[in-house]
Image (cartoon, grey):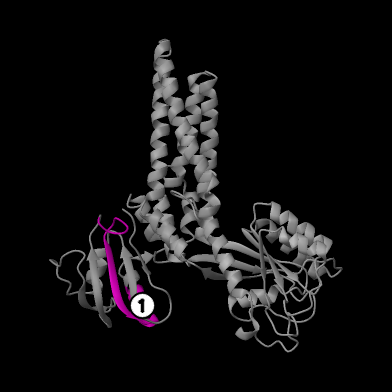
Amino acid sequence: MSKTIAAIATPSGRGGVGIVRVSGPASGDILRTLIPDWPDDHESHNLRLSQIHDTDGELIDESLAVMMEGPKTYTGEDVVEFQCHGGPIILRRVLDATLEAGATTAEPGEFTRRAFLNGRLDLTQAEAVADLVNATSESAHKMALEHLQGRLGESIEAERERVAEALTLVEAAIDFAHEEHVYQIERDEILERLNTTIDELQRLEDQFDRGRRQREGVRVVILGPTNAGKSTLFNALYGSDRAIVTPVAGTTRDFLEEELHLEGVALRVMDTAGLRETTDEVESIGIERSRELKDKADLALWVIDRSEGLSEEAREELAELESSDTPTIAVVNKMDLEDNFTDEDREFLDSLTHVNRTRLAGAAGDNSDDGDSIEAADIEGLEELTDTLAEIAERLTDGEGVLLSRARHLESVRSAREHLEQARRAVRQEMDHEFIALDLRDGLDDLGEIVGEVSTDDILGRIFSEFCVGK
């Protein structure tokens, strides 16, 4: 018999309502210990106004309580919830009372883990619970809901079924290998199923980054030489003086990251150290990190000081970004200062896909000596820039059909595709059926890992450690 667990299921701090959740076989006994006058005939899943007492009989709170009998509960077990006034002392005392009455403290994600183990959710749905709680954008919320409703799990199960059918045909062919005409018919059917599944797994792989961006946000890295206005742009996008801004080149030594939202999409915007040659050891580390972030960016903003023009190095790096898969916006800043672009600079800028022009501070240039905040009247071109950002971010997160969003899913899908491609080659080369069956079983196991049909305590431990206590 499993133990009965309990936890505070609402965030810490004060609030109008706080919930203590209990799940397990002793839930009913714990409820009656804390609420001695609970009616035996009270209907399951119906709230009741009750007085909650500790195990010594002392009144803790008057609140709503509900007994929900399994299996029609979140965990599939008997579940009790005490919906108390949301003071931390009240919730702590109610939780302590449940522990004294026989419950044990729930681990992070243990309620959802039990829901998975009891067949209430597959593993993709369990992960979607955490994603739904942590969603900070409309796109992340939408994806989490789709996964919670089972769309990803259903898609993976459909491919598992196809692979299982192919495996059945191969195993049948092993039994009837002496009848050549039977194998020929099954060979075509096996290839048809494998082709369909491999194509779908390849689609899921190809669109993984779109799903990751929906879940985690689009990584936007601000790059460029020192004193071009990167930190000022970062502050303007974020809406406050998050980054230190001074007239001294090389002020930013490490990267800063903040999240903002445009058209329902989260953008993880990173301000980086200016790119230049330096003998300063600390600044050199910051510059190296800037280059690492550039390589991992989903979208790059390259800030250019119009009064300084473009160096040969800047043109080379911008050209490299423009030819890569990373969408890049050239932000020509300090439009209030003298234009020192050469004809070669202008020709190069005209060749770029996205160029926005901004003035992010007053006549003093990008950085004010006194460190005053940027006033709205001092900003020009920011609205046009954010429009461009929103347009590209929407394109980077848009995808057809079900999308993967976790690295765990991607690893399993990639491994499954590779095993199934090996099986397909083996079928085409008319290899021994046993070799084909082995690759099909490995591919089937890979897909099973996604939905939890094949799992280990290590995998489950990593997944549910991401959850908060009480969920």
In-front residue for pair 139/392 = 392
Q: Is residue 279 left or right of residue 443?
A: right
Q: Please provide percent x and percent y for residue 35.
A: 22, 74
Identity of the residue furthest to the left in this view: 41
Residue at 23% in and 69% down: 66
Which quadrant of the figure has residue 238?
bottom right
Residue at 55% in and 35% down: 418
Secondary structure at badge 1 equals helix
Can the viewer see residue 108 in this picture?
no
Q: Please provide percent x and percent y for residue 139.
A: 46, 61
Please say if 361 is above or below 298: below
Which quadrant of the figure has residue 76?
bottom left
In-front residue for pair 264/443 = 264
Residue at 29% in and 69% down: 81
Q: Is residue 36 left or right of residue 162?
A: left
> Label 1: few (<14), some or many (≥20) within 10 Å?
many
Quadrant location of the C terminus? Answer: bottom left
Q: Which residues are magenta?
A: 72-97
The residue beneath circle 1 is: 91
Q: Please provide percent x and percent y for residue 374.
A: 65, 84
Can the viewer see residue 123 in this picture?
yes
In-front residue for pair 380/6 = 380
Q: Please provide percent x and percent y for residue 88.
A: 39, 80
Residue at 55% in and 25% down: 425
Amino acid type of the residue that numbered disc 1 sits on in the rendered structure: Leu
In-front residue for pair 246/381 = 381
Please say if 132 is above or below 449: below
The question of residue 237 being in magenta is answered with no
Please say if 227 is above or below 428: below
